[in-house]
Structures are given as structure tokens and as C-alpha cells.
């Protein structure tokens, strides 16, 4: 999914979908796009530690297509509460899919 290269987004997971809200990289209150991907369409999921401390890399496979999601568990300058715990929970949920 090259169209999503290097964008900022908010992630959410329900029992059946991975939801993504893509936001403007300069003004994160401006929504650029929304995606709702059925979890059943994910054929493989991998979670790896990143090269930097506090970073996780999630690879989602949809048949021959794949999506790479880089997650940071500390957003400097962000007011997101419990980001570290939320990244860990997201990675646990995703790792069960693959």
C-alpha cells in the first residue's frame, strides 16, 4: 500500500476490524482519510522490535499485499495517554492474528 507511505494515523481494533484514521502530518487534528480493514482479510501478521528503543514494527499481510506499521510507544509532544500500554496491547492483539 504505497499510498500510505510515511503517514501519521490513529489505530483502533474492534472484534472484526482494524480501523485507521490517517491525519495530516502538520496538523494532526485534520483527518485526511479513514480505513476499516476486516481482520479476516489479514493472512499473516508479524510483530518485531524496531531498531530504536520504544519502537515496534508490525507487518500485516493481505494475500500478496502487505502493510508495514511503525509504532512508537512514546510520542514526544503528544498528549496521548497510556501510549506505551496501548502499543503493547495492539501488538498482542495483532500477534494473535498471524
Image (spheres, rainbow, N blue to C red):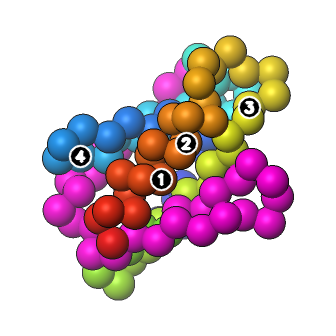
Is the C-beta separation of discs 3 and 1 under 8 Å? Answer: no
Q: Is residue 68 visible?
A: no
Q: Which residue is mark 3?
A: 75
Residue drawn at point x = 38 percent, y = 36 percent: 12
Q: Which residue is mark 4?
A: 17
> Sequence order check: which comes first, mark 2 or mark 3?
3
Residue drawn at point x = 33 percent, y = 72 percent: 98
Instruction: Please give the range of residues in magenta.
Output: 30-58
> Sequence order check: which comes first, mark 4 or mark 2?
4
Identify the residue at the far bottom of this view.
Answer: 64
Up-down relation of residue 67 to residue 82 (above or below):
below
Is the C-beta separation of discs 1 and 2 under 8 Å? Answer: yes
Residue drawn at point x = 69 percent, y = 45 percent: 72
**Mark 2 residue element:** helix
The label nearer to you, 2 versus 3, is 2
**Residue 38: within the magenta?**
yes
Marks 2/3: CA–CA distance: 11 Å
Label placed on residue 91: 1
Q: Which residue occupies the foreground of this view, 1 or 38? A: 38
Residue drawn at point x = 68 percent, y = 15 percent: 79
Q: Which residue occupies the foreground of this view, 92 or 42? A: 92
> Sequence order check: which comes first, mark 4 or mark 3?
4
Amino acid at each position: 500500500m504505497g499510498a500510505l507511505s510515511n503517514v501519521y494515523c490513529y489505530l483502533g481494533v474492534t472484534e472484526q476490524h482494524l480501523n485507521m484514521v490517517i491525519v495530516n502530518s502538520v496538523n494532526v487534528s485534520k483527518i485526511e482519510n479513514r480505513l476499516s480493514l476486516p481482520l479476516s482479510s489479514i493472512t499473516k501478521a508479524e510483530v518485531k522490535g524496531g531498531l530504536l528503543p520504544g519502537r515496534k514494527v508490525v507487518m500485516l499481510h493481505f494475500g500478496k499485499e502487505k502493510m508495514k506499521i511503525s509504532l512508537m510507544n512514546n510520542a514526544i509532544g503528544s498528549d496521548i495517554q497510556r501510549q506505551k500500554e496501548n502499543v503493547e496491547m495492539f501488538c498482542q492483539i495483532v500477534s494473535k492474528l498471524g
